[in-house]
Image (cartoon, rainbow, N blue to C red):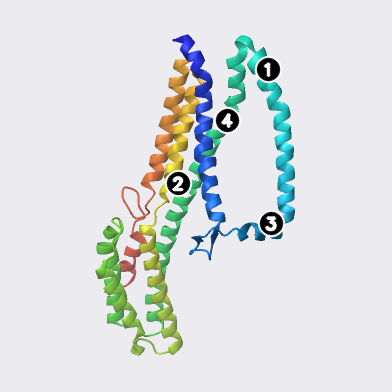
Amino acid sequence: MSALRRRLSPYLLLGPGTLWLLVFFVVPLYYMAKLSLESGFVGSLEFSWHWANYSEALSAYDTQFVRSFYYAGAATLLALLIAYPLAYAIAFKAGRWRNLMLFAVVAPFFTSTAVVFGLLIAFLSNDIWERNRQAERIVFTESDTLIGLYSLSAASGSDNQSLRSAIRAYVSAVVEDEWPRLAVQQRSVRTDSALNALLREVAQSANAKDASIQRTMLDMVLRVRAAHEGRIALSDDRTVVAKWAAVLLLALITQIAIAVVHLEKPRPQMAALCIFTVAAVLVLGLLAIHEAPFQPPVFVPPGPIGDVLRQVPA
């Protein structure tokens, strides 16, 4: 068994790197090459073997291309000067230290895998937290605008029962009917009708003594409509599946890397795998429950909008 393990160790060490290059180099390179031969405008690009893209790019960025080839050539030459003597030493001069030296060469790659996994987690969490912060801002904007609409109406002397009823009907529809529907990505017909009724009520010229005040009130109702549509859009918004797939794939590669690093020490191997797996599951689980800002178990509450009912009398 030990002899078999020694024979398989080099291949196991190369496995994560080969998989990494295939998934994160060969596949992206294919899609980049395909994209480079497309033509059209952003949002309506079509693959058409448009080789003129290359001549246009070379003429526009010739200095940058020359500099890139210079740096790439210098890095390649330096890598060859270091890699070939080291490979020769490992293959013919290392003796019983061969596996240890091979591990020393490959081990830094595992660290980079964990670093990239952590960076992808950071990018994913930033997207999710930003979506939740945007949802909170929209809710407070909607609440403040509704209260401001009532306050302006009362201060201008155009306050009336029908306007207050329209505001309260809209708020009740949002809290009672629309919020539960947001969790399942559905619109609320009742809320849409209440918002249209509020807009019609404010649009009536009798609701304001001054035309400028009425225009301001109409602008406020339109801001409420924009916030309402923003909430609907956010309830449908989800992180691109490819991002979650990339994170999960990197987590698997990192697990393999950790296992290979401790290949000769089963107990440290199990401990490291358990620690990493528990940490990854907790972090990914925390992100998953915050993925949708209006979906339980953790979601943005309608409290600020519901508070409008206490501010606007019946």
Disc nearer the start of the sequence (4/3): 3
Give the label on residue 109, or none. 4
- Alpha carbon distance from label 4 to label 3: 33 Å
Mark 3 neighbour density, 10 Å: few (under 14) some (14–19) many (20 or more):
some
* Residue at the image position 25 percent from the left and 63 percent from the top: 177
Q: Amino acid at mark 2?
A: Lys
Residue at mark 1: 89
Label 2's element? helix
Sequence order check, earlier mark of 4 and 1: 1
| Disc nearest the viewer among 3 and 2 | 3
Query: Could you tell me if the residues under marks 3 and 2 are in contact, i.e. CB atoms within 8 Å?
Result: no
The residue that mark 3 highlights is 58
User: Nearer the observer, disc 1 or disc 3?
Assistant: 3
Q: Position of residue 145 (x, y in %)?
A: 41, 71
Say which residue label 2 marks.
Answer: 243
What's the residue type where badge 3 is placed?
Leu
Where is residue 206 drawn, in percent x and y? 34, 89
Q: Residue at x 24, y 70 (%)?
A: 190
On the image, the x and y values in percent for residue 36 come to 57, 55
Q: Is tag 1's residue or tag 2's residue first in the polypeptide sequence?
A: 1
Query: Within the image, what quadrant is residue 96 found in?
Result: top right
